[in-house]
Image (cartoon, rainbow, N blue to C red):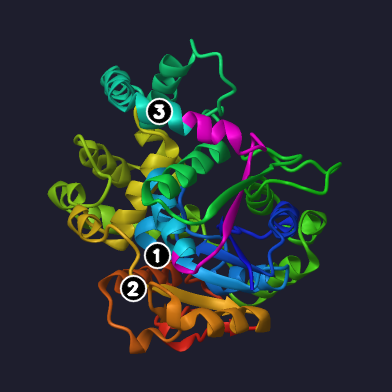
Amino acid sequence: MKATGVVVEHNPFHNGHFYHIKESRKKTAADIIIAVMSGNFLQRGEPALVDKWSRTEMALKAGVDIVIELPYVFATAQASDFARGSITLLEALECEAFCFGSEEGTIEPFTRSYDVLTTQQEAYQNSIKQYMQLGLSYPKALNEAYSDITTHLNLPLVDLSKPNNILGYHYIETACQMQAHIKPVTIQRIVANYHDNVDQDQSIASATGIRKALFDDGSIEALGKFMPHTSLEQLLKWKDSIGVFGSWQQFWPLLRHTIIRSSTKNLASYAEVTEGIEHLIHEAARECETFEDFMSRVKSKRYTWTRIQRMLTHIYTGFTWESLKEHQKPTYLRVLGMTQNGQKYLSEKKKNLSLPLVSRVAATKDSLLDLDIHASDLYQLGLQSPKIKQPVGMDYRKPPIIL
C-alpha cells in the first residue's frame, strides 16, 4: 500500500482541506493518506478551536486514513522545528511522498531556493542577525535577508513572504537535511489566502476566516458552505456538548492567573521568552482585563503576534527552555484515529516502523508523551464554563478513533 503524508491542523477541517486531501491522493496515486496533526495547541501559539479527537474525526470522515499526533514540542514551535517534527514522523511511517499546499504551486522553486541558501548559508545567517539587531522580528529579518541573497539572481525562486511557502520551504529543508526517502510534492492553494475573511460568494475560506466569523457572529450553521457536512456536524456537536470553543479569549482568566502568580524570573524560564519581555508580560497581565488589551500592550515591531502567543502557550503549559532542549526529535507515533484501510496499513508496516506506535498512553513511558498529556489536561481546564465542567485525563480514557 502506497502512503502519502500531509501535515495539518484542521482548525477546523474545511473545503480547502478536503481539496488538499483529494488532490494529494490523486497527484501521488496514494492508497493511504496519513495526516500528522497538531494536538490541542497550535503552531501560531493558540488553543485549538475544538480538541484533537474532534478534529481527528473530521479528518477521517473526509478522506484521511490515519491521524498521528504531532507532539506539543513541535506543534507549537517555529516553522523549522515544526517541519522537523512533522517530516520525521512521516518518514518513520514509511510514506513515499508528502504533499503540502502552497502559494507557489510547483516544487522546483522550493528546491532551487534551498540550493541557493545552502551554498550561501553563512552570508544568509549574518544578514538575518543584522536585521534583527535593527529591531525587526525574526520572520521579517529572514525575509529581508532572503531578498538580499536572491534579488540579483535570475532564477525562479519561491516567495518566502507567504506563510504556506515558508512552511513548505522548511519541509523540504528538513527532508534534504535528513536525507529522507520521502518525496516532496505541492499543490496550489486556491481561492482563499491564509488570513482572508470569509467570502459568502465562495465555497472555500481560510480556517482563520472561519474562526473569526464563528467568534464574531456565533452562527455555526452560516459556515456550512465552507466545510464538509461532517465537519459542520462535529462543530454543532461540540457546541451542544461543550458550550464554548478554544481561544485565548476563553482561556484568558487562567492564563492571566498563571502570569501574575509567577515571578518575572519564572516567566523568563519558559520557552521562547527572551530579552526581558517577561517584565512587560507581567506588567500587562496585571493591568489588562481582556486578552485583546493585553496583546495590544505587548505586541511590537520586534515581536509578532504569533511569537508572543507561542510564549504565552509555553507559560500556560509550563513548558521551559530546559525541556525544549531535552526534546529535539519525536520518539513515538501517537495514533489518534484511523479508518479500516489505515488500520490495515499500520498492521502491514508495524514491524518495520522506526518509531514505536502508541495507541494506549497508559502503557507508554515517555517524557515527550507526558508533555502532550499535560497540555491536553490544561486545554480541558481552559474550556470550563458554567454549563460544562471539563474532566482532565482524557488522553488516558480516549482510545484511537476507528471508522
The span from disc 3 to disc 2 (Cα, nearest Å) is 34 Å
The amino acid marked with disc number 3 is: Leu
> What is the x, y in percent for residue 401?
59, 82
Q: Check contact, mark 2 vs mark 1: CB within 8 A.
A: yes
Would residue 342 appear left or right of 204 to someone viewing this image?
left
Residue beneath disc 3: 117
In the picture, residue 59 is in which quadrant? bottom right
Residue 111 in magenta? yes
Q: Residue at x 38, y 83 (%)?
A: 361
In the picture, residue 392 is in which quadrant? bottom left
- Of tags 3 and 1, which is closer to the observer? 3
291 lies above or below 154: below
Q: Residue at x 38, y 41 (%)?
A: 307
Taking depth in this image into account, of 10 and 185 the one nearest to the observer is 185
* Range covered by the magenta-colored residues: 92-113
Q: Which label number is shown at residue 71?
A: 1
Residue 23 in magenta? no
The disc, 3 or 2, on the residue closer to the chain's N-terminal end is: 3
Q: Label 2 crowding class (10 Å Cα cut-off): few <14, some 14-19, many 20+?
A: many
Q: Which label number is shown at residue 369?
A: 2
Taking depth in this image into account, of 311 and 341 the one nearest to the observer is 341
The amino acid marked with disc number 2 is: Leu
The C terminus - image quarter? bottom right
Taking depth in this image into account, of 54 and 350 the one nearest to the observer is 350
